[in-house]
Amino acid sequence: ERARLLLLLLLDQLEVLGQIMALDRRAHAYTRLLMEAEARMSKEAWTRATDVSDLVHGEVISLRTTVL
C-alpha cells in the first residue's frame, strides 16, 4: 500500500512538472516573439533615422552650395 501511494505521489509530481514545463515553453516562445519584434522595430527605426540623416545632410549641402 505504501509503495502504491508513493507511486501515485510520484506520478502526480511528474504531471505537475510536465505542466510547469509546458508553461515554461510557452513563456519562452512568447519572450522570443517579443525579442524578435523588438529587434525588427529597432532595425526599422535605425533605417528611418539613417534615411532622415542622409536627407538632411543632402539639404544642408544643397543650402551651402546655394549660399556660397
Image: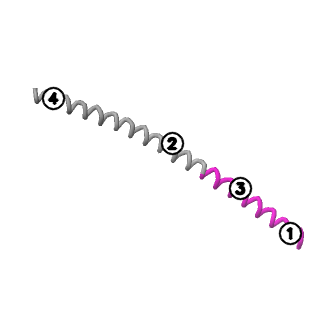
In magenta segment, residue 38: no
Q: Residues within 10 Å of mark 3 (few under 14, many from 20)?
A: few
Asked where in the image residue 49 lies, by quadrant, the reply is bottom right
Which circle, 4 or 1, is nearer the viewer? 4
Spatial separation of the CA atoms under disc 4 and disc 1: 89 Å
Spatial separation of the CA atoms under disc 3 and disc 2: 27 Å
> Please, is residue 56 above or below residue 44 in the view?
below
Q: Which residue is mark 2?
A: 33
Helix, strand or loop at label 1? It is helix
Q: Residue at x 60, y 49 (%)?
A: 41
Q: Residue furthest bottom?
A: 68
Q: Which residue is mark 1?
A: 65
Badge 3 amino acid: Asp
Q: Residues within 10 Å of mark 1 (few under 14, many from 20)?
A: few
Badge 4 amino acid: Leu
Badge 1 amino acid: Thr
> Please, is residue 7 above or below residue 30 in the view?
above
Mark before the other along the chain sequence, 2 or 1: 2
Q: Residue at x 56, y 45 (%)?
A: 37
Q: Residue at x 51, y 47 (%)?
A: 35
Q: Which residue is mark 4?
A: 5
Which circle, 3 or 2, is nearer the viewer? 2
